[in-house]
Image (tube, rainbow, N blue to C red):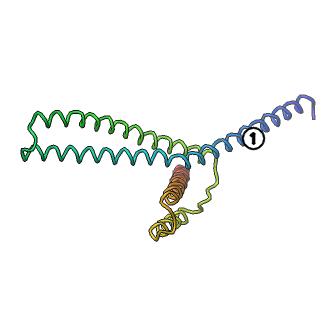
Amino acid sequence: MSEGIEKIVEKYEIEIKRLEDLWQSYREAARTMVNSWIRERINIIAKISELEGLLKSYENELKELEVKYEIGVINEEELTKKTGPLIENMRILRDTLDKLKESLKRIDEIMIIHALQAKLPMSGGSLNDIKRKLKTLKELYEKGQIRKEVYEKLKLELEMQERILQESLEVIKGTKERS
């Protein structure tokens, strides 16, 4: 081979090695990030649940005040005085809940995209395997064989795997349909 051709080949072999190293670094970073998200997203879900409970209690309090007004226990001035701050708190809570839910959805979608792009292996197997594991997990929880925290954590992990696998299948199906 001529010296010029050897330099071209060498140049691209070096670049290919660099790209392979970058790809491996990306895959590892994606794996770390997705695994971390699977563990930590439960905190956001717990906060959403907590805020939804608080919102429900505010709604119940508001209904109670309306009933008290209707039966004459409180007058219109008292109703207005008590419901004003309650309604404002409910508005703030709804805004916060909407933002948290949107953030959860957005980050879940991004994690799925990165898991797909990095071709992360799925430990769950097939979609049916994951559904079977979810069913078994629920049965164990209902029988009291596992704690609620363990149940929720494993359930979230399996649901995330299910979503990633479902998304993968949709991408593959879409690719085959375009072919």
Which one is in front, 41 or 2? Answer: 41
Name the residue located 78 percent from the left edge and 34 percent from the top edge: 15
Name the residue carrying label 1.
20
In the picture as drawn, the residue positioned furthest to the front comes out as 73
Q: Quadrant of the N terminus?
A: top right
Q: Amino acid at mark 1?
A: Glu
Q: Give how far across and how far down residue 87 sits, in percent.
A: 24, 36
Q: Is residue 111 left or right of residue 16?
A: left
Name the residue located 40 percent from the left edge and 45 percent from the top edge: 48
Name the residue located 44 percent from the left edge and 48 percent from the top edge: 46
Q: Give how far across and how far down residue 129 sits, in percent.
A: 55, 66
Q: Give how far across and how far down residue 63 sits, in percent.
A: 18, 46
In the picture as drawn, the residue positioned furthest to the bottom comes out as 143
Q: Is residue 60 left or right of residue 125?
A: left
Task: Describe the element under mark 1 as helix, strand or loop.
Answer: helix
Check disc 1: other Cα within 10 Å, few if <14, some if 14-19, many if 20+.
few
In the picture as drawn, the residue positioned furthest to the top comes out as 4
Q: Is residue 47 left or right of residue 25?
A: left
Q: Quadrant of residue 124?
A: bottom right
- Asked if residue 133 is positioned above or below residue 117 in the image, the reply reads below
Which one is in front, 35 or 76? Answer: 76
Which one is in front, 16 or 118? Answer: 118
Q: Is residue 111 left or right of residue 91?
A: right
- Asked if residue 145 is positioned above or below residue 100 in the image, the reply reads below
